[in-house]
């Protein structure tokens, strides 16, 4: 092979790998990203049952109910609308009433939210950013 | 007083680093020979000033001087000595000071070990190092002063964030920064080469060990962080594809590519421009990582405080350095002569293949990390990109890379024989096939992908042995002869062996734990028993306990084998840190035969039972043992006397070459 052909071979295979990676990325971005919604978003514009999403807001006071075994339900609110969430498993250490929370899961046809992951803040100063932003937007933010 | 002295030393360091930039560039223009010496001395002085400053902050932390805001917010009189020390960098300001300290340390190393470097190259390198140092020192002084005082000194501090109070996290930041910042040396060498428009033999000789050292620290730092997240957070996961983890993983991927392309450059003089570009990209990822973690655009355990001015400042630094570097690259790369022809199927070709996959996978990680940030900035839509995205994009790219690893070292430089390499790898392939089939046979219904994965890991591990034993001549020579040859092989051969072997081991751990791991969540009362992967786990109940700066409820579990013989006792606890009122979960872990039983306590239910989460983690420790092997490989390779930076013979030859040139 001439020098030019060799260079073309390297560039060609490089482009092929990039194209494959770009294809994978585009496919994955369509399939695997998860949108963030507040309770108001969910109530106002219902999302098809089964679509994965992240629901963020505050845990409503007095709404945490522990059921059989490891089942737990709580209500996520942005102080305007509320969505009931059910979850099976261990809640994070810093999960508390009236504190920020992000629940990842999907809506059921019945209109409640089934979470498979619940995230709370990492330390006492930290509010999940999405939650803080959405509360600020709605004018109900009380932090600094 | 020492606190003010530390602040003063930091200002002095900024001034000195600016002098370092000026004298470095002027010296490289060759106006005055004495300036070479001055640049070196100023660099050492900058390092000394930052060291004094860092020492002053350390002193304030050790003495629990709560009149300093930084100490007040991140320390406590009652925490153990180790965490008083790690509290220095367990916060934004202190960790930036550590960053600057390590940067100037590396600059000082260039001066100390670089006696045989061409003077022009060395001056340019030091000038670029000085530019980075001055930018970050200015950042610290302007936005993140660790020496700010409180008007009234409180009696007690607010304590270090409890999740950071752990040995792993005490050494994770320094290791990670040694890696991140270590790549600055490769970057500065790349810049110096572009400024001069030429790359000589000394360049590759130098860049390779520095990259290797930085890569080694980064590998250790990432592995340490991963293990910390695994046992300290109590979630049982070892990698979350969290943006902050990705921030450290991207420079690792491109750094690994750089390591390999630097080999080609050193041995064959080829891929010069590509190596320079990789050096720029790798350090750019380090800067991007610093920006992502320190600016507060991401929220995670790592973002201590978000202050918009800081984010903007680091963004400006990032843009200036990355933009400047690529502009210079675009202007000057054409001047660098290319060299070293090679056939696509050759050692060089294999290393190009490795580079293509590593950089492409780094690009997919970059997209997954930045896409949510960009989308939010442009459209306001909030999304999260998690593990499924990376499994689908990064995962497939790793398969062809792992498949190719055993071939690389077996191919000859310039023109290799793929068929001959394949023949030598027959028994590695056989082992991999046996492992894959055994996997399907042993665990009926195991996914085909699992079998392929295990086969792939065995392939990489066995392939690394084929290379090592083949080079020693086992099979061709008598055993004793081969053994003697094995002992006489260059250290860098062992470095390659340990590196690739470690990669295979890590892959094995990842695949085993992903495919065969189990997770159970249940409620247990004292006396309850549960089966975990052939073992029996019995819950003894909860007992209160008081530690130095926390109180906790300890849950004790007895692990027994299936015949009821006791194996070990696991303790998991729910801790409450007094000063911050912050709860944490301490996991109970039992290790045997590389596998672990992992128990994490949840909340108490109303009926007196406790929620317990139990994982079976088969071969999980291999993930980190693999990293240990990679680090061992890097150390072995660094001690190869042919690569030793100060190897006297080579040095004399180089300098005489330069003198005659």
Image (cartoon, rainbow, N blue to C red):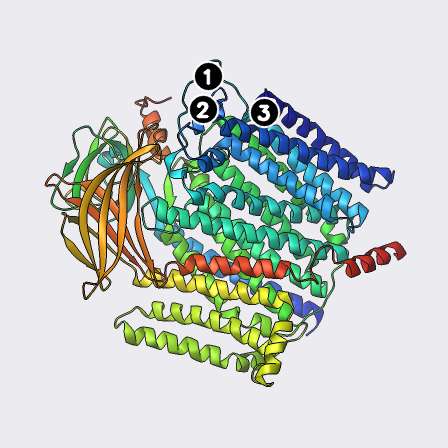
Q: What element carries label 2?
A: helix
Q: Is mark 3 on a helix, strand or loop?
A: helix
Instruction: Check the image and report above or below for B361 versus A90.
Output: below
Q: What element carries label 1?
A: loop
Same chain for marks 3 and 1?
yes
Percent of width and height locating residue B468? 57, 73
Task: Identify the residue under disc 2.
Answer: B72
Confirm whether residue B297 shows in the render.
no
Relative placement, left or right, of B409 versus B501 is right
Task: Identify the residue under disc 3.
Answer: B142
Instruction: Check the image and report above or below for B324 versus B19.
Output: below
Q: How crowded is mark 1: few (under 14 residues within 10 Å), some or many (20 or more)?
A: some
Q: Which of marks 2 and 3 is in front?
A: 2
Relative placement, left or right, of B626 versus B201 is left
Mark 3 vs mark 1, CA separation in Å: 23 Å
Q: In which quarter of the image is residue B268?
A: bottom right
Who is closer to the viewer here, A14 or B21? B21
Mark 1 vs mark 2, CA separation in Å: 8 Å
Q: Residues within 10 Å of mark 3 (few under 14, many from 20)?
A: few
Q: Upstream in the sequence, badge 3 or badge 1?
A: 3
Relative placement, left or right, of B193 versus B361 is right
Task: Identify the residue under disc 1.
Answer: B153
Percent of width and height locating residue B659? 88, 54
Subunit under mark 2:
B
Circles 1, 2 touching at the beta carbon (< 8 Å): yes
Q: Upstream in the sequence, badge 1 or badge 2?
A: 2
Subunit under mark 3:
B
Percent of width and height locating residue B436? 37, 74
């Amino acid at each position: 092979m001439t020098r030019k052909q060799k260079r073309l071979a390297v560039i060609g295979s490089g482009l092929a790998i990039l194209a494959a990676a770009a294809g994978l990325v585009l496919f994955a971005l369509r399939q695997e990203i998860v949108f963030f919604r507040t309770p108001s978003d969910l109530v106002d514009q219902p999302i098809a049952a089964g679509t994965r999403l992240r629901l963020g807001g505050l845990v409503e006071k007095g709404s945490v109910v522990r059921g059989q075994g490891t089942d737990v339900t709580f209500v996520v609110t942005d102080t305007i609308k509320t969505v009931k969430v059910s979850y099976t498993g261990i809640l994070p250490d810093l999960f508390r009433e009236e504190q920020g929370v992000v629940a990842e899961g999907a809506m059921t046809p019945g209109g409640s939210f089934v979470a498979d992951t619940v995230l709370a803040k990492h330390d006492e100063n930290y509010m999940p950013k999405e939650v803080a932003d959405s509360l600020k937007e709605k004018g109900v933010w009380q932090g600094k | 007083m020492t606190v003010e002295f530390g602040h003063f030393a930091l200002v002095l360091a900024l001034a000195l680093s600016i002098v370092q930039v000026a004298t470095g560039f002027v010296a490289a223009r060759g106006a005055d020979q004495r300036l070479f010496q001055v640049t070196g001395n100023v660099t050492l002085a900058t390092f000394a000033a930052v060291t004094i400053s860092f020492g002053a902050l350390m002193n304030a932390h050790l003495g629990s001087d709560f009149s300093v805001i930084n100490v007040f917010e991140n320390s406590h009189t009652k925490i153990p000595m180790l965490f008083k020390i790690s509290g220095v960098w367990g916060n934004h300001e202190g960790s930036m000071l550590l960053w600057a300290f390590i940067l100037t340390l590396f600059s000082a190393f260039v001066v100390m070990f670089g006696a045989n470097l061409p003077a022009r190259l060395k001056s340019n390198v030091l000038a670029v190092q000085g530019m980075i140092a001055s930018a970050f020192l200015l950042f610290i002084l302007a936005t993140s002063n660790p020496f700010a005082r409180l008007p009234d000194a409180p009696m007690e501090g607010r304590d270090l964030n409890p999740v950071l109070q752990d040995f792993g996290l005490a050494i994770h930041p320094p290791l990670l920064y040694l890696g991140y910042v270590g790549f600055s040396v490769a970057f500065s060498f790349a810049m110096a080469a572009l400024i001069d428009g030429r790359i000589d033999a000394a360049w590759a000789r130098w860049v390779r060990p520095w990259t290797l050292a930085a890569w080694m620290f980064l590998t250790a730092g990432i592995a340490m962080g991963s293990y910390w997240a695994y046992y300290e957070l109590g979630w049982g996961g070892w990698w979350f594809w969290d943006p902050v983890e990705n921030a450290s993983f991207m420079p690792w991927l491109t750094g690994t590519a750089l390591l390999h392309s630097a080999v080609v450059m050193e041995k064959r003089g080829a891929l010069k421009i590509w190596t320079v570009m990789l050096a720029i990209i790798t350090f750019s990822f380090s800067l991007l990582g610093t920006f992502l973690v320190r600016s507060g655009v991401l929220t995670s355990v790592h973002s201590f405080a978000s202050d918009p001015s800081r984010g903007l400042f680091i963004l400006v630094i990032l843009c200036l350095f990355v933009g400047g570097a690529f502009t210079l690259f675009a202007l000057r790369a054409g001047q660098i002569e290319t060299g070293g022809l090679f056939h696509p199927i050759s050692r060089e070709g294999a290393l190009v293949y490795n580079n293509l996959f590593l950089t492409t996978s780094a690009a997919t990680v970059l997209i997954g990390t930045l896409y949510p940030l960009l989308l939010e900035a442009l459209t306001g839509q909030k999304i999260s990109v998690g593990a499924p995205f990376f499994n689908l994009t990064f995962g497939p790219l790793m398969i062809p890379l792992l498949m190719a690893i055993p071939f690389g070292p077996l191919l000859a430089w310039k023109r290799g024989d793929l068929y001959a390499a394949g023949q030598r790898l027959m028994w590695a392939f056989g082992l991999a096939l046996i492992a894959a089939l055994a996997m399907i046979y042993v665990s009926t219904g195991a996914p085909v992908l699992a079998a392929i994965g295990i086969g792939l890991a065995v392939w990489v591990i066995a392939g690394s042995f084929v290379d090592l034993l083949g080079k020693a001549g086992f099979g061709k020579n008598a055993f004793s002869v081969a053994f003697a040859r094995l002992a006489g092989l260059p250290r860098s051969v062992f470095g390659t062996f340990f590196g690739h072997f470690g990669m295979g081991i890590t892959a094995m751990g990842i695949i085993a734990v992903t495919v065969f791991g189990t997770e159970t969540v249940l409620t247990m009362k004292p006396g309850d028993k549960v089966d975990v992967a052939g073992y029996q786990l019995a819950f003894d109940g909860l007992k209160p306990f008081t530690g130095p700066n926390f109180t906790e409820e300890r849950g004790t579990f007895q692990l027994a084998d299936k015949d009821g013989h006791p194996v070990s006792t696991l303790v998991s606890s729910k801790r409450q840190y007094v000063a911050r009122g912050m709860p944490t979960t301490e996991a109970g872990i039992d290790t045997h035969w590389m596998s672990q039983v992992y128990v994490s306590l949840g909340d108490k239910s109303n009926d007196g039972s406790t929620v317990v989460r139990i994982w079976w983690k088969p071969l999980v420790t291999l993930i980190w043992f693999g990293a240990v092997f990679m680090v061992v490989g890097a150390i072995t390779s660094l001690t190869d006397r042919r690569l030793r930076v100060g190897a006297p013979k080579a040095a004399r030859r180089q300098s005489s070459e330069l003198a005659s040139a």
